[in-house]
Image (tube, coloured by chain):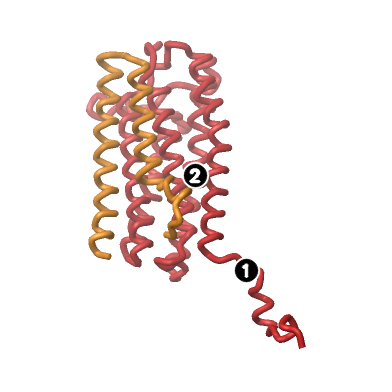
Chain colours: A orange, B red
């Protein structure tokens, strides 16, 4: 139970770091490369990370309680 | 005497009660369908930005945009932490994280309304960074699209903060258990959705295209 709990908290922290890094990358891509496509891809990846890790979309088709 | 007539009134009252796991699945599906319907609203606003602005954008403060985005991401993290704590029966972390998520959401809201919209007509700099925006809703397509997108998003931030405060209040009274805390889960999903919308709005408003003064 404690292992599961620690893993859940760790996932949140890892997700936050991924999102922060991608946001900084996004900023520098905009400043230096000015690539619309790349910016859009980064936004999609960020959204996917949030939907998967924070919003737990997988619970929709899993027999999972809280 | 038939089997039906031997039932007590208590049994009858619970005969049609939906089991909690089934109810939970239906709740989740309902919430996601609602969020999917919201996608059309935000998708239309997002599309209008590209139709009306093309490869240009208004010259907005990059620092405010980046900082506001960071604060909203941090807020999302605290909401996740709050939900995780509720799921594991950690009441103290649940309440504290929910409050932090609401606080950061409020800071984000203030940054958009007070600083970027500049509703009080202020001016000022900090370390050479301009703190208050100049764009007005009447400034053609730049103003119209910017205020429509940030306004609709800010409205969702505001309702998200209200929801977080409701679960915080209920949580203080011991309303949620590790087994039953759908209210917390739903609020967290909604709050993360608001974050997802900003993930697309931020580059569309602040980063994509050539800045026009």
Query: In x, y percent, where is residue B61?
Result: 34, 24
- Is residue B146 shown above or below B158? above
Question: Which SS class for mark 1?
Answer: loop
- Is residue A46 shown above or below B185? above
**Label 1 or label 2, whichever comes before in sequence order:** 1
In the rendered image, which quarter contains the N terminus of chain B? bottom right
- Is residue B47 shown above or below B162? above
- Calculate the distance from the C-alpha at mark 1 to the C-alpha at mark 2: 34 Å
Chain ID of residue with mark 1? B
| Residue B17: image tag | 1
The part of the image, by quadrant, that contains residue A32 is top left
Residue at (67% x, 76% y) in the render: B13
Q: Residues within 10 Å of mark 1 (few under 14, many from 20)?
A: few
| Residue B158: image tag | 2
Q: Is residue A23 left or right of residue B46?
A: left
Chain ID of residue with mark 2? B
């Amino acid at each position: 139970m404690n292992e599961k709990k620690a893993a859940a908290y760790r996932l949140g922290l890892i997700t936050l770091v991924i999102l922060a890094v991608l946001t900084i990358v996004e900023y520098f891509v905009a400043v230096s490369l000015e690539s619309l496509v790349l910016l859009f891809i980064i936004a999609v990846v960020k959204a996917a990370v949030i939907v998967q890790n924070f919003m737990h979309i997988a619970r929709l088709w899993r027999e999972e309680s809280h | 005497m038939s089997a039906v007539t031997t039932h007590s009134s208590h049994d009858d009252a619970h005969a049609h009660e939906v089991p909690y796991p089934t109810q939970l699945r239906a709740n989740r599906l309902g919430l996601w369908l609602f969020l999917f319907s919201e996608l059309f609203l935000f998708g239309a606003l997002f599309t209008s930005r590209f139709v009306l602005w093309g490869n240009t954008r208004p010259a907005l403060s990059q620092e405010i945009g980046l900082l506001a985005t960071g604060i909203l991401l941090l807020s999302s993290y605290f909401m996740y932490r709050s939900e995780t704590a509720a799921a594991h029966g950690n009441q103290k972390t649940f309440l504290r994280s929910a409050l932090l998520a609401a606080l950061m959401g409020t800071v984000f809201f203030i940054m958009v309304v007070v600083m970027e919209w500049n509703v009080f007509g202020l001016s000022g700099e900090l370390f050479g960074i301009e703190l208050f925006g100049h764009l007005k809703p009447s400034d053609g397509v730049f103003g119209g699209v910017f205020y429509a997108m940030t306004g609709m998003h800010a409205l969702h931030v505001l309702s998200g903060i209200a929801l977080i405060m409701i679960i915080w209040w209920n949580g203080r009274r011991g309303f949620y258990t590790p087994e039953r805390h759908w209210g917390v889960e739903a609020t967290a999903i909604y709050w993360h959705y608001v974050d997802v919308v900003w993930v697309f709005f931020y580059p569309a408003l602040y980063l994509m295209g050539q800045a026009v003064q």
